[in-house]
Image (spheres, coloured by chain):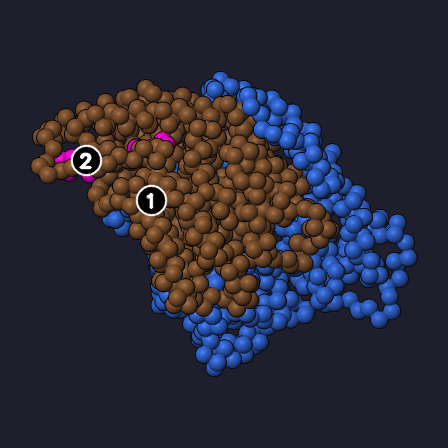
Chain colours: A blue, B brown
Amino acid sequence: MHMSAEEFRRYGREVVDWIADYHSRIESLPVQSTVEPGGVRGLLPAHPPLAAEGFDGVLRDLESVILPGITHWQHPSFFGFYPANASGPAMLAELLSAGLGVQGMMWATSPACTELEQHMLDWLVELLDLPAAFRSDGAGGGVIQDTASTAILTALLAALHRVSGGEVRRSGVRAGAYAVYASSQVHSAVPKAVVMAGLGEASLRTVPVDPVTQAMDVGELRRMLAADVAAGVRPVLVVAAAGTTSTAAFDPVLEIGRVCREVGAWLHVDAAYAGVAAVCPELRFVNAGLEYADSYCTNPHKWLLTNFDCDAFYVADRAPLLGALSVLPEFLRNAASESGAVVDYRDWHVQLGRRFRALKLWAVIRWYGVEGLRAHIRGHVTLAAEFAAWVRADKRFELVSASLGLVTFRLRGGRTEELHSALNGSGRIYLTHTRVNDLYTLRFAIGGTHTGGAHVGAAWELIAGTVTGMGELDRPERGMRPEPEIQPDS
Amino acid sequence: MHMSAEEFRRYGREVVDWIADYHSRIESLPVQSTVEPGGVRGLLPAHPPLAAEGFDGVLRDLESVILPGITHWQHPSFFGFYPANASGPAMLAELLSAGLGVQGMMWATSPACTELEQHMLDWLVELLDLPAAFRSDGAGGGVIQDTASTAILTALLAALHRVSGGEVRRSGVRAGAYAVYASSQVHSAVPKAVVMAGLGEASLRTVPVDPVTQAMDVGELRRMLAADVAAGVRPVLVVAAAGTTSTAAFDPVLEIGRVCREVGAWLHVDAAYAGVAAVCPELRFVNAGLEYADSYCTNPHKWLLTNFDCDAFYVADRAPLLGALSVLPEFLRNAASESGAVVDYRDWHVQLGRRFRALKLWAVIRWYGVEGLRAHIRGHVTLAAEFAAWVRADKRFELVSASLGLVTFRLRGGRTEELHSALNGSGRIYLTHTRVNDLYTLRFAIGGTHTGGAHVGAAWELIAGTVTGMGELDRPERGMRPEPEIQPDS
């Protein structure tokens, strides 16, 4: 009935080969799935099988049922959203984690799961030159969260605990008593966290950004904070973006941090995409101001070759986090936890159960080494700068921003959305969009594991050629002015 | 620099073989790790490697560094907590998910990821004979959450949205205005969710249980609800357990559901462990009253051979869930979502990003078929009944409960904690404990993928023999009375 060891070896090889083949032929597949709604379900049996079917059918249906419904995030010409890059060592470590099948909710339930995670997050502090306060040997520490969204919710809960002296945990939120601040460019995870924590949308203060840099206006933040304090509203949390979702813009974290200290607000720095760039010494501007951060996160699952999910979340002081989230029912009591000598990660996040995700980071860091990780990031930043130069040199386009591996641009002729449809419809590349200063803008995010110069060059040829085919776009409309450019190191 | 296709094939085979070997020799390893705090970290290099190291070191260190720090959840003599059973098809599907590396946050980002998930959750409705309202073709639907803890938080947020008519989303929680109800046997995830949602611990009403059945006292629930309503407090959510964490006790869901309807409270049924037992027609008492459930969850990652994480969460009406959690920033806008023809799972849970977890369920259901899944559950329930009979027949022991695959018991002589230490210290089996009516009680949870009669028999021999070795336990203390027994189908 169960899969025998020999069957596991046989099907395991088939799966490994299937994945190797998939990555070898991925460039022959259209990047974006073209199925219509219901197109996948329509191919699936209405009812589960009564008798055992084996594994061959799964592999067969992967080809005929699943692949047509896949938008290939690992395709080297996938330039959408931010990358979610995977790599061979990460995939195999994910399999090892599934094979071990341990629960890491507490140190005692598998000490290696907790200790390797602490160690990898300390390694990452060194790799990224993060503040020493984030290391596990001081008052703070790091933990793997599933996503930056959950990390923001976790930061908010810790901040509420600190600012209320535990009152929120005991008695709940008083509507209107607290406020959270983030820029208009903030990720949607912030309003979602504000709602989930019971503060309500009305508690979120949206700070305007500079229209050129898209960075938070700290003068406005200061005014909003002062107005709230004067009105008896307690500032809880400021979320600063080190790399926004739209344009990878950087909020002035250092200045924001100083303001936070003045009013006692918690500073969370969301560097989900950009943070890992600090593996390169020349890109450590992304860490500016982190010494003021009460919490911080960056996602190795975006741009550091570690397959989803792996968000590295740090606090400078773990006491308010544990104060907000610790629970200790009888069935979890054990001598190691009560000795105080160990960390129990169940109290560091929303969930109780957790997989052995540190194995992925361990495998990736050892496979690539610091040098390999640097080469990976550096290569994409260089390619993005080249791509931005091509956009800038072509008068039909307007370069909106260029920061790290992300370039955003639009057509001067105003048919950007049409261009977007044509590009994604080609199946050859995949881009997503945003709005910058309320104008439809394309995002070109370079970060795929196997994305190289040839892919970026071909993408630019396709983009430029598609515009040529659209016709009548060569002459900028009268009155259009190019926006000033944002440099990667600004 | 990157792992080539050939390297992936080679190391992939080594990893597959390592896992096959691990499971083949797992019974030669002590179930519980014996490392001391720091024992794993002490073997790891202080700094990350500068140069690439390859993959051989990871496989080597798995043996020498990681395995000694593992408590083997997949060991057939692991009887602790509830099982977290994995299986060959699930592990290989996890690898496929990592290999595809897609983000399923929206239908558009990989339609197959969303549609296979909808389909598998509909299959599960049929497999478990759940209410039709949970199917995706009506007002409700299912989604894979990471854990039952997150499912409870999600249910609470949906309940708050419904009961407040959206006011909580807009303006936040008013401390003291809402209350949540669960029994004293409730999982710690409920108080944690109440805290995270901003209600505060003071909003949680702990309903007493019947000391024999450990099931919620519905008369007390009714009185508490009435008292709150009279005091102007709004009942939001009642969490009923279909299988508690301590003893797999069943709250009277049907009666609770009727009470919930009267006061307009949301009923969430937490069947994290026990729900999957309904794959067997003769065990469908676990579904009693589900027609009153507004939301429900069960974990295939506990007892249905699907490796963590895979919690199946259902709502009878998805509108309040989407009302509570939906967000739509520009960068996620797309034609498919705006057409209303598709489901975007980003709005069904806390996180934004999500893996392709439905592949695991698909592979497991097809590998085993309905018959195989039934045989798996049935076998463990039969073994648990045998084990309970042995406990009952040995006058040195007191049988506290027996429900599905879980048996709880204690020594009449009062040295149960000492017995526990001796058993886990032996390395041959692993048990965890709870307190029932405030007495230290051992939990014996049968649910491992490869746990069979020989393992359960050997465990009982070890337990009985260890007690014999402890001496002076044969005579029950005067005045001790055996507690009435709880039957699996009570």
Residue stretch in magenta = B404-417
Q: In the image, residue B33 lies at what x, y percent?
A: 31, 34
Q: Please give the name of the residue rendered at 21% of the width and 25% of the height, measured from the top-left corner.
A: B393
For the point 38% across and 30% down, the residue is B447
| Camera-side residue of B408 and A367 | B408
Residue A83 appears anywhere in the view:
no
Give the secondary structure at mark 1. loop
Q: Nearer the viewer, residue A14 or B373?
A: B373
Residue A489 among those drawn in magenta: no
List the residue tagged with mark 2: B482
Whether residue A267 is situated above or below residue B104 in the rendered picture: below
Look at the picture and state if A443 lies above or below A11.
below
Q: Amino acid at mark 2?
A: Pro
Mark 2 closeness class: few <14, some 14–19, many ≥20 residues within 10 Å: few
On the rendered image, what quadrant is the C terminus of chain A found in? bottom right
At label 1, the amino acid type is Ala
Residue B490 at x, y = what percent?
35, 35
Looking at the picture, how far across and down is residue B46, in whole percent?
38, 45
User: Where residue B57 appears, x then y in whole percent?
Assistant: 44, 32
Q: Which residue is mark 1?
A: B215
| Towards the viewer: A187 or A65 | A65
Helix, strand or loop under label 2: loop
- In the rendered image, which quarter is residue B226 located in? bottom left
Q: Is residue A41 left or right of residue A3?
A: right
